[in-house]
Image (spheres, grey):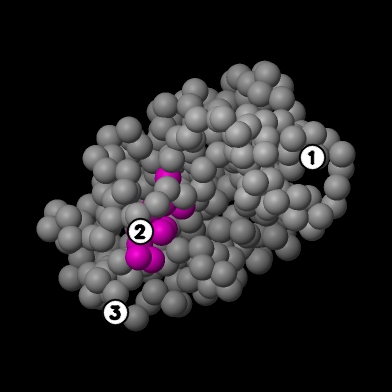
Amino acid sequence: MAEDRGISARAVTLHIGVQKTASTALHHLLRRNADALAAQLVVRMPVQGTPAQRMGRAAVDFSLDPTPEREAHLVAQIEALRDEIAPGDLPVLVSHENLPGAMLGNPGVTTLYPMLERLLELYDRHLAPFAPRYAFYTREIGAWKRSVHNQAVKTDGYAGTWDDFTDETADCGTWDGLADRMRAAVGADRIAVFALEDEPDQMRPGQQLLRFAGLTEAQIAALSPLGWRSNQSLNPGALEFMRRVNGAGLEAQPRQKVMQIVMENQALFAPDAPGQDPRA
C-alpha cells in the first residue's frame, strides 16, 4: 500500500515534465523495467493510443487554444485515465512532459506554461476522488532554454534564430516562480520540485521522482540501467538547416519527413561535431 501523506490513501503522482529534463530517458527506463515494476508501481506514460498519451496531447492543444471544445476533449482524456488507474492499491505514476502545456517556442508562448493553473484545476477536478501530487524537474535555465530552442526547431516548426528566441523569452519567468504558482494552486504539500543536476546516474534517470512516487532505494537500485542515450539535440548545422526548412512554410507531414531524414543523417551537416548533451 502506498504511503498515506495526508492526501489520499493511495499516492497518485503526476510527473508534469517539464520538457527537456530527461523525461524521454525516464520513459525508456520504465519500459525497460516494466516487468520488475509491475508489482510495485502502476506506471502510465505517453504510449500511443493510451489515455495518458492522449491527455498530454490534449493538454498542449488546450493550452494553445482554450476553447470549450478543447477543454471537453481534455476532460474526457483525464477521466479515461482516472478510470484506467482506479482498480488496485499500488501507488500510481503518470508521466508526460506535456501535462503543463505547451513549452516556449510554440506559437504565442513566451513565458513558462501560462495555462498551468487552469490545467492543474482540471486535473484535480476530474481525477477525483484521487488527489494527485505533482512533480516536475528543473534544469539550469540557460542550458534548458538552449535545448528548448533546439527542440522547438526540431519538432514544433519554430523558425527563429537563437537570438530571436532569447529575445522573445527574456522575461519567461523562473523555476521558483513556477513552483510558487503551483503551490498557490494546489497546496505546498502536493508539490515536489527536483533538479536534474541532482540525479546521480544518467543511465538510471528519474531516481528522485521514483522515490517520491513510492519506490524504495533497493527497488530503484535494482532497475536495469539504460544502454543508450535518447532524444539528443540536433547538431548546429542540422539545427540551422531545419530552422530554414521551418521558415519555408512546409505542411506538417512533409516537414516531419524532412526532420526525420535530418535526424538520421546529422553527420552530413557537421561531420566533426562533438557529441550532444544526453539530457538535451
Verify whether residue 51 appears in magenta. Answer: no
Q: Earlier in the sequence, mark 1 or mark 3?
A: 3
Q: Earlier in the sequence, mark 3 or mark 2?
A: 2
Q: Residues within 10 Å of mark 2 (few under 14, many from 20)?
A: many
The answer to whether 88 is drawn above or below residue 242 in the figure is below
Look at the magenta stretch and give its main secondary structure. Answer: helix
Residue type pointed to by label 3: Gly
Residue type pointed to by label 2: Leu
Residue shown at 45% from the left, 63% from the top: 45
Magenta highlight range: 22-32
Side of 88 relative to 155 (left or right): left
Verify whether residue 29 appears in magenta. Answer: yes
Residue 15 visible in the displayed image: no
Residue shown at 56% from the left, 30% from the top: 272
The residue where tag 1 is placed is 246
Secondary element type, mark 3: loop
How far apart are the alpha carbons under marks 1 and 3? 46 Å
Numbered badge on residue 29: 2
Residue shown at 68% from the left, 19% from the top: 163
Side of 254 relative to 45 (left or right): right
Q: Nearer the viewer, mark 1 or mark 3?
A: 1
Residue 247 visible in the displayed image: yes
Horizontal and vertical percent for residue 271? 60, 34
Which one is in front, 4 or 228?
228
The residue where tag 3 is placed is 88
